[in-house]
Image: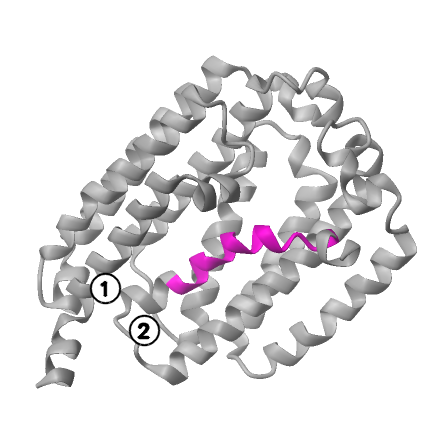
Amino acid sequence: MKLISLIRPKQWLKNLFVFAPILFAGQLLNFPMLAKTLYAFAAFCLTSSMVYIINDIVDIDADRNHKKKRFRPLASGEVSVREAVIFGFILLLPVLLILTRLEINFSVVILIYFLLNILYTFKFKHVVILDVFIISIGFMLRVEGGAAAIGAVFSSWMILTTIFLSLFLAISKRRAELSGTENENVENQRKVLEHYDITFTDQMNTVAVTGTIICYALYTVSDKAVSTFHTDNLIYTTPFVIYGMFRYLYLLHKKNLGESPEQIVTKDLSLIINIFLWFIVSFAIIYKPKLTSFFN
């Protein structure tokens, strides 16, 4: 159990971005492509877990000063550094096996993702603004990885949507870390926080939210989307995106949440229902022709 906690399986929720290309390529019912996407998802989960292990080894002293992170396996002493390193190498083996089953382009994406996160762990997470951009690029690489796994070309508008959305999540995390009443020594726990303040993060979030909504709306009516799905009805999924962004802001500002995006997405009932409805409506619009031909 302590080793499972070390690889943070709850964080794997972020890797669901890998499924965006197959969903919007209209190939979710294509089982060979779905299998490749599942392989890509597994590869990102295991690779991100290796990154978490490295990060926890590097941050072991800082985590011990954090009221929550001090209970992590390495910081608490439940797992030794030696055990963590060995387990990290064990995780590498299935990743290498998965890469043999996917296109070389996916291997390039996963390598870039891993190296970028290593640079983030050792350097970039201490550089103001660049730290949240690196997190954002990580999400973009998940999307690019999903596209590379199935040989799809992802819309530029959706790439921009992913960038703005992930920036929003990263900035919200910084804001929550600053405003959390239990984080009394935030600078000692995360040095870059001394360069941020609530007003600054709120201003950046305004840009990120606006960019997410506008880029997504423009994607739904883009020539590529209309020609791919043979309809412009995808625009009707935009209200779900707007509501989701506003709900997240509400939880961030009024409930002081946001430090753990995966907890918000999995525990807030309103947000869960909204995401579910967005998926159902999107699926119905994108796959209506295929479903109609299937049942006729």
Dividing the picture into quarters, in which one does residue 176 lie? Answer: top right
The part of the chain drawn in magenta is 6-19
Q: Are marks 2 and 1 in contact (CB under 8 Å)?
A: yes
The residue singled out by tag 2 in the image is 28
Residue 67 falls left or right of residue 130: right
Residue 95, percent from left and from top: 66, 72
Name above or below for residue 3 compared with residue 72.
below
For the residue pair 60 and 211, the one nearer the viewer reads as 60
Q: Residue under label 1, please give it.
A: 283
Q: What's the residue type where badge 2 is placed?
A: Leu
- Around disc 1, counting alpha carbons within 10 Å, would you say few (fewer than 14), some (14 to 19), or many (20 or more)? some
Secondary element at image label 1: helix
Residue at 40%, 19% (x, y): give it. Answer: 203
x and y, in percent, of residue 295 in the image: 12, 83
What element does badge 2 sit on? loop
145 vs 221: above or below? below
98 or 118: nearer the viewer: 98
Relative to 75, say whether 185 is above or below.
Answer: above
- Circle 2 Cα neighbour tier, 10 Å, few/some/many (<14 / 14–19 / ≥20): many
The mark nearer the N terminus, 2 or 1, is 2
Q: Residue at x 44, y 26 (%)?
A: 252
**Mark count:** 2
Within the magenta stretch, is there residue 48?
no
Type of amino acid at the residue the image marks with label 1: Phe
Q: Is residue 237 left or right of residue 183?
A: left
Is residue 127 toward the left or the right of residue 235 in the image?
A: right
Q: State the colouring used for the structure image.
A: one colour
Within the magenta stretch, is there residue 12?
A: yes
Looking at this view, is 87 or 125 the one in front?
Answer: 87
Picture coordinates of residue 256, whole percent (x, y): 49, 23
- Quarter of the rendering containing residue 282: bottom left
